[in-house]
Structures are given as C-alpha cells and as structure tokens.
Image (cartoon, rainbow, N blue to C red):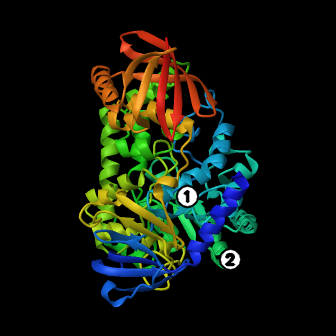
C-alpha cells in the first residue's frame, strides 16, 4: 500500500467518523459550570457539536452506531493552556536575553526548531488532554504556521497574538524580521502603526509587554510616562475588535493597564499583596487573570543548576527540549563556566532565596484572594520559557494552584470554561453542553478527587473525532534514544526503562550478550543510579539511520575525575528499543 493511498484512506476514515453519530454511554459527566458530577449519562455528537446529553436509560442507541463505553469513566471538557509560547522551546537555549549560550547553539537554530516542532508540540498538548492553547506572543511566521495547521482536526485549536508590542526590546531579538517576537513601542504615534502592522496576519488578539525597570519610584514614573502609549495600543486593538493581553507583574502597571481597557492579565501580581479595591477593579472590568505560578521558579532552578524533572515530564516532554536542560552539566566545563557558576552561586545565596520565597508567597496569596473574590482565573504555564516544558508542565501548574488554596472545581474551571472566556468562545466550547464543540477528554479516574487523575486519560476527542492518544505523538528512533538519555541523566529508573522493549537485549559489540529483558536492566541500572549521584552522559555525535541510532557518548560520574568514552548503537523495533550494542 503506497504512502499516498494510506494518507487518503486515513482522511476518508476521519471524515466518516466525523459524520457518524457517536455515543459515549454510561459516563459520568464533569459539569464545570455547575460544579457537579452527573453519572450514568450518554453524550451524543455527530461531527463537531454535541447534539444530546441525557440519562443513558432515556437514549436508545441505533444498531451499528459508533459507541464508546464510558462505564466507570469521567467525561470532561477539553482543557486549555491559556499561556504558551511557540517561539520558545522550553529548552536551555531558547531565551538568549536571559541566558546567553549562543556560542554553543545559535539562536537561528532555535528559530528553526520552533517552526519544525510546533505541530509535534501541539500533538503533545492534545495527548495530555488540551484541545486548545493560547499563545500570547508569537511571530509573523508562526502566525502563518498557525494558519497552515488549522485544518488538521487531530491538533488542538491555536489562538495566537503577533509579536509582543513592548516597552523594552531585548537586544538578542532585534533584526529578526518575521521571526522577531518583539516590536518596540516608543511613542503614542507608533501605537496605531504597530497594531495595524499585525492586522494582515489575522492575530486572535494583541499582546503588550509592559516592562518598567529600576527601583519602585523609577518604575512608577516610567509606568506613568508610558501610559498614553499603552492606552493608544489598547484603543487601536479594540477598534479592530481585538482583545488585549498584557504582561504587567507590578500592581501599578497592571492597574494602569486595566484602567485603560486591558482584557487579559497573563501573569499574577508579584510585587505586593493586592487590595480589595484592586479585586473590585478586575471584576468590574471583567478582566481574566492567568497566574503562571511556576515559570519563574523554573528559571531560578535552572540558574541554580538544580532543575529536576519527574517521571511524567521525562516521558511526555519533547525529548530534545528537555534533554538540552541537562547540558548545563557539561557546559560548566566550557568557556562559559565562570558565568554559569556565578549564577549558581547567586541563586544559592540566602538573600536570593529569600527574594524568591517572598515573590512566590505574594503570587500564592494574591491568587487565593482573587479566586475567593470572584475574579476569573485561567490556568496557564508560560510554557516554552527555559525549563517550562510544553504540555507536560500543565499538571504541575494546576497542582501549584491547588497549593495556593483554590479547590478542585475552581481549578477545573480555570482549565476549561474560563480560558474560553478570554476570546469570547464560552458559548462554543469549554463545557459539556448541547451545541458546544465536542472537544472532550475521557478520564479513567475522578479529577475532583485528585488532580493527578487528569493525567489518567483513556481517550481524547477533538472536534467530534475520537483519537487514540497512544498514536497522537509520532515515535521516532531519535526520540526514543534521547528520552532514555534524559532519564539516565536524571537517574530516573522508570522513565529510563519506558522506551525499552520488555525483551530488550544489551550486547558488548559485536555480539557478546550482557543482559536480556527489562527486569535485568532495572536491577543493574537501579544500582548504578543509586551509587552515581554525578552521573552524566553527553552526546558528542549522533547518527540516525532508518531504525537505528548511533550515539558517541562521553559519560562522567562513573568514577571520580574520569570520563568514559563509548559508542552506543540502538536498534528500534515496534516503537521500542529492542537491542543495544556498546563499543568501549
């Protein structure tokens, strides 16, 4: 069967399913509007809209219908990460303005990576139950890419702004033409021009980066000076029926922006505890707030060289992105060692730790006050920033919101119906109701009992199309090889073994068998991980040839002060590593 015919057949199958009547029967519906679980329901859809929701005993299902058994399962609306950035990978090299490692990886390579991997990242979002994402700050080339991916019903919906209209432009991002993520706002006269410049690319909204610097007094003076230009951007966007998202982490910049019409605060307030009057202002203006509790700590942990990832993240993040985070170990032995170690020292100092603890506490308290005060909260990660991985970071953010004092129902609303309100989509999606989009997640466990159950997904349904989540993300020989290297560097035995076949064989090249089966690997590598706290594998060179990956590796931490140079040959069969040959 030719590849062309396979694609045509798959498209035909998708269209057939989309036009068929589909029944999810005997399922418990997670009603995020009324904060209740409704058991024994049958949800019906034919294509994108939900056509019926009734007690299962009241629905007679015609013969030969497409039926999904929901017994013992929970059906909730598809989730939304309300703050991501596709111009950023989540890896170590993605923000040269924050951590400049361009001598090791040119920023042009990062730009290319973002274009080649946006579709793959979207697949990861869908696999983890997110049927839409909001990107407040992209590029003109990424807006074009958004358009080219729109027709693929097997991807989440993407809502994207153009470049951030900013009061400060980092030097590293200048002169990048249509790959530039920032456009400098220097006057009222430029405000209209910068908004109009984006209109031909059909952004879903406009984003402002309201940055002020210096001590508190200087920041307030700058904020006041910039206010006319900020207002002019907001007014011009609204004239063109575009909402405005704004980065404003100080109370006074956020208040200024909201008073001038900003619709969406993409971060929490982190410089002071907010007042009841500020909460009343947000409610009166119907402003939505995305708290992004975890993104800054991911920067700080990276700078302090103590960023770690759990099994879920190691298995579900993009392997190349998360793998770059472990490069810090060998980069500390390069010409950048002085800069990197200075950062490590600084972020280990009591003064810095106290500052981080204080801002974390302010964010947490402010979120609880806003949630209790009735402000609409939308969950978002700011994924793509250094250390904050696309898709896999979402559950960590939700759990941080829980730790702030929000309850499970508030958090489920923040991940479903509330993000839909950002762009006035709440009548189209965000909850399970007749007439709304059949963007759904079928869970094996009750999410109201435990937020971790949001990762226990049986099936994802996008635009009425049931999708086998195990087939959403394409597995490649390179991704499997990198995934196990990442877990090796993390000394995480479960994530390390996941890419391997149950009957995997390890050989000393050319043919001396040294281990057979996963359990034998578990025993030997668990012992290695326990005994080697400084274990680190650097990939010096990689060759991918069909179903084989050849890695030239330099391994440190096995013996004090000694590096082991080796070559590993990975053979892949049925999307698992079936054989490994080591050459020493």
- Asked whether the viewer can see residue 413, the reply is no
Q: Which mark is residue 185?
A: none
Towards the viewer: 248 or 90:
90
Proximity of marks 1 and 2: CB atoms separated by less than 8 Å:
no
* Image quarter of residue 140: bottom right
The image shows residue 189 at horizontal and vertical percentages of: 73, 65
* Image quarter of residue 528: top left
Does residue 282 appear left or right of residue 101 in this picture?
A: left
The image shows residue 465 at horizontal and vertical percentages of: 53, 70
- Secondary element under disc 1, as helix, strand or loop, is loop
Comes first in the chain, label 1 or label 2: 1
Q: Kindly identify which residue carries mark 2.
A: 240
Q: How crowded is mark 1: few (under 14 residues within 10 Å), some or many (20 or more)?
A: many
Q: Kindly identify which residue carries mark 1.
A: 210
Does residue 511 appear left or right of residue 162 in this picture?
A: left
Towards the viewer: 435 or 99:
435
State the separation of the CA atoms marked 1 and 2: 21 Å
Q: How many marks?
A: 2
The image shows residue 221 at horizontal and vertical percentages of: 52, 57
**Front tag of 1 and 2:** 2
Q: How crowded is mark 2: few (under 14 residues within 10 Å), some or many (20 or more)?
A: few
- Residue, far bottom: 58
Q: Which residue is drawn at 71% across and 58% down?
A: 5
- The image shows residue 375, relative to residue 115, as above or below, that is below
- Secondary element under disc 2, as helix, strand or loop, is loop
Q: Which residue is drawn at 66% across and 49% down?
A: 115
* Image quarter of residue 517: top left
């Amino acid at each position: 069967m030719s590849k062309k015919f396979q694609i045509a057949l798959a498209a035909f199958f998708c269209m057939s399913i989309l036009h068929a009547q589909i029944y999810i029967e005997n399922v418990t519906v997670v009603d995020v509007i009324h904060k209740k679980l409704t058991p024994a329901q049958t949800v019906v859809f034919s294509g994108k809209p939900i056509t019926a929701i009734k007690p299962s005993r009241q629905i007679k299902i015609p013969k030969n219908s497409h039926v999904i058994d929901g017994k013992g399962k929970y059906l909730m609306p598809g989730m939304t990460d309300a703050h991501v950035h596709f111009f950023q990978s989540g890896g170590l090299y993605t923000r040269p303005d924050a951590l400049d490692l361009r001598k090791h990886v040119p920023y042009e390579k990062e730009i290319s990576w973002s274009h080649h991997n946006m579709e793959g990242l979207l697949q990861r979002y869908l696999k983890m139950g997110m049927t839409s994402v909001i990107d407040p700050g992209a590029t003109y080339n990424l807006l074009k890419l958004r358009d080219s991916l729109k027709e693929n019903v097997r991807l989440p919906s993407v809502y994207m702004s153009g470049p951030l209209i900013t009061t400060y432009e980092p030097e590293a991002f200048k002169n990048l033409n249509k790959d530039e993520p920032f456009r400098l706002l220097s006057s009222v006269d430029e405000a209209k021009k910068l908004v109009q410049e984006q209109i031909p690319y059909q952004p879903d909204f406009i984003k402002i980066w309201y940055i002020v610097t210096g001590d508190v007094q200087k920041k307030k003076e700058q904020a006041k000076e910039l206010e006319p230009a900020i207002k002019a951007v907001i007014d011009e966007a609204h004239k063109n029926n575009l909402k405005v998202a704004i980065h404003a982490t100080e109370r006074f910049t956020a208040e200024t922006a909201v008073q001038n019409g900003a619709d969406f605060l993409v971060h929490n307030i982190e410089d002071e505890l907010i007042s009841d009057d500020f909460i009343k202002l947000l409610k009166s203006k119907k402003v939505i707030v995305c708290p992004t509790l975890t993104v800054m700590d991911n920067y700080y942990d990276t700078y302090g060289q103590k960023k770690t990832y759990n099994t879920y993240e190691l298995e579900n993040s993009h392997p190349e992105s998360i793998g770059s985070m472990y490069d810090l170990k060998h980069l500390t032995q390069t010409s950048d060692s002085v800069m990197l170690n200075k950062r490590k020292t600084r972020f280990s100092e009591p003064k810095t730790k106290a500052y981080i603890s204080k801002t974390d506490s302010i964010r947490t308290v402010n979120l609880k006050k806003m949630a209790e005060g009735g402000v609409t909260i939308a969950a978002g990660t700011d994924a793509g920033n250094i250390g904050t991985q696309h898709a896999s970071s979402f559950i960590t953010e939700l759990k941080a919101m829980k730790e702030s004092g929000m309850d499970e129902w508030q958090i489920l609303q923040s991940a479903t119906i509330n993000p839909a309100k950002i762009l006035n989509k709440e009548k189209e999606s965000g909850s399970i109701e007749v007439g709304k989009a059949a963007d759904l997640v079928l869970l094996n466990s009750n999410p109201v009992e435990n937020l971790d159950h949001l990762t226990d997904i049986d099936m994802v349904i996008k635009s009425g199309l049931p999708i086998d989540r195990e087939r959403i993300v394409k597995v490649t020989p390179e991704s499997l090889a990198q995934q196990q290297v990442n877990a090796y560097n993390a000394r995480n035995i479960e994530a390390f073994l996941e890419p391997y076949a149950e009957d995997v064989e390890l050989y000393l090249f050319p043919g001396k068998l040294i281990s057979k089966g996963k359990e034998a690997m578990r025993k030997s590598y668990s012992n290695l991980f326990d005994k080697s706290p400084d274990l680190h594998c650097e990939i010096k060179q990689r060759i991918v040839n069909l179903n084989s990956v050849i890695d030239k590796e330099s391994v440190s931490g096995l013996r004090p002060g000694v590096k082991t140079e080796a070559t590993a040959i990975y053979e892949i069969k049925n999307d698992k590593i079936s054989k490994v040959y080591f050459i020493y």
